[in-house]
Amino acid sequence: MMPPLNTIAFLVENKAGVLFNVSNMFRRRGFNIESISVGPVEGHQISRMTVSVYANNKELNQIVLQLEKMVDIIKVKRLDKMRSIMREMVLIKVDTVDPMAREETLRHVNAYHGLILHIDAESIIAEVTGESEVIDEFISKTRPIGIEELSRTGVTALEKGNLKL
């Protein structure tokens, strides 16, 4: 049985080599990073990383301990799905030369509360944001129409209420 997918958020110094060191720590311990999202916060001195990894409780505790030992990491926190908002975003280009494909694509994007970013004679580019399962479902339902290309972000997350990293 596969271990559960867990999400960890951490603050790091925003400098060269930090992402490499973090991903290398996961590699050395034999964990595949399922999803990663990184971006600067607080005046570009600090970045926030959000990593999703399949790991059991014991393995996840070990990952957190290893991250906390790293010099460039400021703070680490396991995120609870019930107490967090977690989202992904997908940009998707769909072949819509056929008018029926165009109509169906517009319906799908609308049903998933997405945005149409570009339309031309050959294709539509849309953006959909949601939980990972919602993005998976949207892609699955759009695939038969004719996906030309897609780009998907990693999970990003914030804790609800007064909880914070």
Image (cartoon, rainbow, N blue to C red):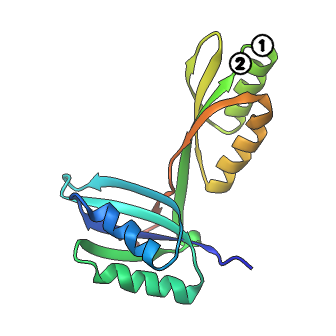
Q: Nearer the viewer, residue 152 or 158?
A: 152
Does residue 9 show up?
yes
Horizontal and vertical percent for residue 56?
60, 83
Does residue 164 show up?
no
Q: Do labels 2 and 1 touch, CB within 8 Å? A: yes
Check disc 2 and give the amino acid type. Answer: Thr
Secondary structure under the numbered disc 2 in the rendered image: loop
Q: Residues within 10 Å of mark 2 (few under 14, many from 20)?
A: many
In the displayed structure image, the side of residue 127 where residue 17 appears, left or right:
left
What is the number of the mark on residue 37? none
- Which residue shows up at 44% across the image and 68% down it? 161
Q: CA distance from mark 2 to mark 1?
A: 7 Å
Q: Is residue 141 above or below residue 105?
A: below
What is the number of the mark on residue 96? 2
Residue furthest to the bottom in view is: 58
The residue carrying mark 1 is: 99
Horizontal and vertical percent for residue 23?
40, 66
